Image (cartoon, coloured by chain):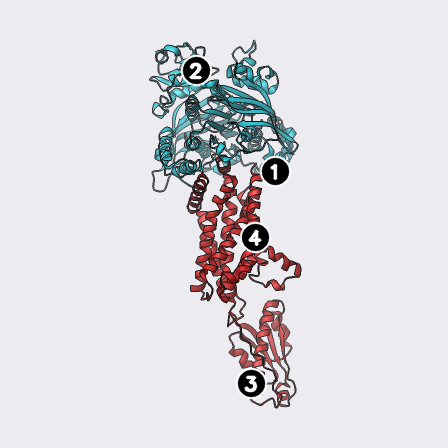
Amino acid sequence: MHALRRIVALMKKEFLMILKDPRSRFVIIGPPLIQFFVFGYAATYDLKNVSYAALDESKTAESRQLLSRLDGSENFNRVKTLLSDREIDDVIDRQNARLVVHIGSEFARSIHSGRPAAVQVIVDGRNSNVAMIALGYISTIVAEYNEKLAAGGRLAGRGPGLVLVSRAWFNRNLQSRWFIVSALGGIISMVVVMILTSLSVAREREFGTFDQLLVAPFTPGEILLGKSLPGMLFGLMDALIFCAGAVYWFGVPFRGTVFALVTVLACFIVAIVGVGLLVSSLSVTMQQALLGSFVFMMPAVVLSGFATPIENMPRWLQLATHVNPIRYIIKALRQVFLEGADVYMLWPQIWPLIIMAAVMLPAAGWLFRHRTQ
Amino acid sequence: MTDRSSIPAPADPEPVLAVRDLKKEFPLKKRPAVKALRGVSFDARAGQVTGLVGADGAGKTTLIRTAAGLLAPTAGTVTVLGLDSAADSIEIQSRVGYMPQKFGLYQDLTVEENMALYADLRGVPVAERKARYRILLQMTDLSAFTKRRAGALSGGMKQKLGLACALIKSPKMLLLDEPTVGVDPVSRRELWKIVYEMVEKEGIGVLLSTAYLDEAERCQHVVVLHEGAMLAEGAPATFREQVAGRTFLVDPPSGVKPREIQMRIAGQERILDATIRSGRVRVVTAEADKSPIIDSLSGPWHAEVENAPPTFEDAFMATIPQAHRIDLSKPAQTSTSAEKHGTGEVVVQTRDLTKRFGDFTAVKGITFEVRRAEIFGLLGPNGAGKSTTFRMLCGLLPNTAGEISVAGQNLRRSRSRARSRLGYMAQQFSMYGQISVEENLRFYGRAYGLSRKRLQKRLQWAYEEFGLDRWRDKAAGQLPGGYKQRLAMAAALLHEPEILFLDEPTSGVDPLARREFWLRINGFAQQGVTVVVTTHFMEESEYCDRMLIMSMGKTLAMGTPAEIRTLARTEKNPAPTIDDAFVALAEGTISGNDATPAADLQGDDP
């Protein structure tokens, strides 16, 4: 009973401190808002308006049809029409165009005579990501053109025997914004919770108020609990606000249950509080606490599958991601938003978070006790 | 006193600093501007130390910063070495040595590197440096520590290094802002020696601010500031003449503690000041008449009253306007019944208490005990191991060897309930700066499990007792220094602890606030609260019932103030002060071991 009152007293004080300190207030509002819009608008894999140059040596109806398909898509933007293949080097070197589409003089003749007609694409490989995606788009356009020729009977008798019809589930237009924004709540709550909890103990150490707290009849557990609960509440609140923002601002579908969303976020935040307190117990100054938080957050985000697929990583790194709490929340959030998962479906993501919290919090408590000297 | 002719000035010294009708206001949002200086005029001369004396908020720092060209005056002028402080601040800064309260030493650079850095910043020619370093290092006794990081120096050594850096470019004038705050007596004497050497050898003028009144006696010329106004100036001797015949010493009758006498006298009509000095109560009266003292000491308190030679401190206390004096009459007028607590149970006990940090032994086998309602002092210079001992007592540090018991428990291992019996006041201000006074007090009240009703009652008590009422909605970090200390103390006492731990409670606190503080402590001890206090102000140990003097982690001496003083009694110095005893003990000219058997002092206790 007394313990409960002490924890409530400490929580009240923490709330007051966070709300009265302009810097802490900014931590719970500023960075989340910036992240929400920066990631929402800037982080996208969809290529638009790729600049390209065309070198049409065929100069036939067929070659023009192919090029007009490129020009007609919103993905490509012709910046230059070349007259000879000597100009190609220059255009790519100066980055005037990301790629050059070269249609040989034999193009139309080959089509009509039933021989394979080649279209050469020269891509600037300095940005491999853009090159890969752009090439993908071109092959799609070429394949569509092929189909049309076949349908029109122009490729006498040599039409494709197999036609691939692809349908993307969960994200029909494969918009990368859905992919990014749905998982954003996890990243945002992590930043808020990490910074608030890692600073909370370090701030008291730095301002010399910590001794006063240790001499008062608090047990270490009570101090940890009283200090972490406010951070958890602010983190959860932020995450939920920005999940709502994802739906109502960016139009990401929400197909799962709110209960599942809150449950998995809560488990995640408790695990992150464990990490934050661990950092906090290890650091003496606020500077160290902040640095420590970023030392954890940077690799944790990279290894989470938030931006790049975990499947692309080498095997040993893939194994390492299993102890990364962010991996689970990212997966779980995408499941809730896009797959329409409920708590039962999220269970494989929830239990590792619970285990992590169960290890991290006592570890923080132990360290906290042993560092109080 | 403002008569300049009375200054014992060496051979017509020219003024190096002339302050004329100086006013400085700091505008505030919404509220009226703070008037830090309200028209101050005086001169400081070459070859002299001019002291700026006053309590916190007197305007000392503002004046020195204005003289250093760091602040522009609102009205009036400061002329330094013939230059106007506002117009020629760059020129002044290159000719003047300035040491702010917190000197900007780089903690991670060595002593040598810090000096080299300041030599670079001040443009000292490389050819002159070697000789200058040698003089300064010798003067400051830092020659052996040139390779040590500044952060690893003791408080006194840091101040000396700061002074050396301020002197790096043989300045014509030296501005020192409270150079001796928080410095132990040995280091203070050394700092003064350096200042005198500079004045004598190089003939520079020094303007020095201080809140230590005994230091004013060391100045050739003293300027007393109070709340931005200049109250008086003159040589210390002229100040002393002002109170001639008005200073008295009261000998407490046997069996009565000097602090009980002091509490009866303090705050009475026509009494300007009452303090404890060397086991006797020193009193300054409004007129040359000792009857107000005799009137307040009737019956069992009847005591001998004799005239005493006046000091600067007496004059200062008489100069400060009455209205600003603290009301001393309130504290518990309880009878000598507190005496019967005095020989009560042992509340705090240590045996062979030892603390090692790696190879370094900070505390070596300290043994003592404190009884209920005693005021027990832990004294020693910076780095003596006081704070380490103290932190072990409070359970903030584990001890390496030996035993500790506080209220029958080792707080390091005890359950949290045992801790609710003690109150703790840290050396550093340890309230939450952003939240208000009331929110701080409420937090600590709840932390100690006070019920809603009791908390309300205790808050009321705290507001009244400490005069915090008008500050209750103010952020704690914005309180003036003295009120911060009151708040910290109120928070430590809110839950009515049995034992009060105070770590350097008066460090950096001005003389008025210190008097008030000790009167409160006396009051609490009389109500049966046990007080353990660390301090490096030797004269404050007079308020303690018993004390332990530490140096280099070891016990130098333990006993009552009278017993400690007796240790230093020699033919040359028949009435030594605790300060004398401490310096003699620290230098090893006398040994305190024969005064240590603690049990003997307590007589026949179980």
Kind of residue indicated by mark 3 = Lys
Q: Are marks 2 and 1 in contact (CB under 8 Å)?
A: no
Res. B109 mark: 1
Kind of residue indicated by mark 4 = Ile
Could you classify mark 3 by the number of other residues whose Cα lies within 10 Å: few (under 14), some (14-19), or many (20 or more)? some
Could you classify mark 2 by the number of other residues whose Cα lies within 10 Å: few (under 14), some (14-19), or many (20 or more)? many
Which is nearer the eye, A242 or B324? A242
Task: Read off the residue under disc 2.
Answer: B281
Task: Read off the residue under disc 3.
Answer: A148
- Disc 3 sits on a residue from what chain? A
Kind of residue indicated by mark 2 = Val
To the question of a shared chain for discs 2 and 4, the answer is no
Residue B21 quadrant: top left
Task: Read off the residue under disc 4.
Answer: A355
Point out residue B501 in the picture as x, y percentages from the top left corner. 49, 28
Q: Which chain is red?
A: A
- Disc 2 sits on a residue from what chain? B
Tag 4, which secondary structure? helix
Shade representing chain B = cyan
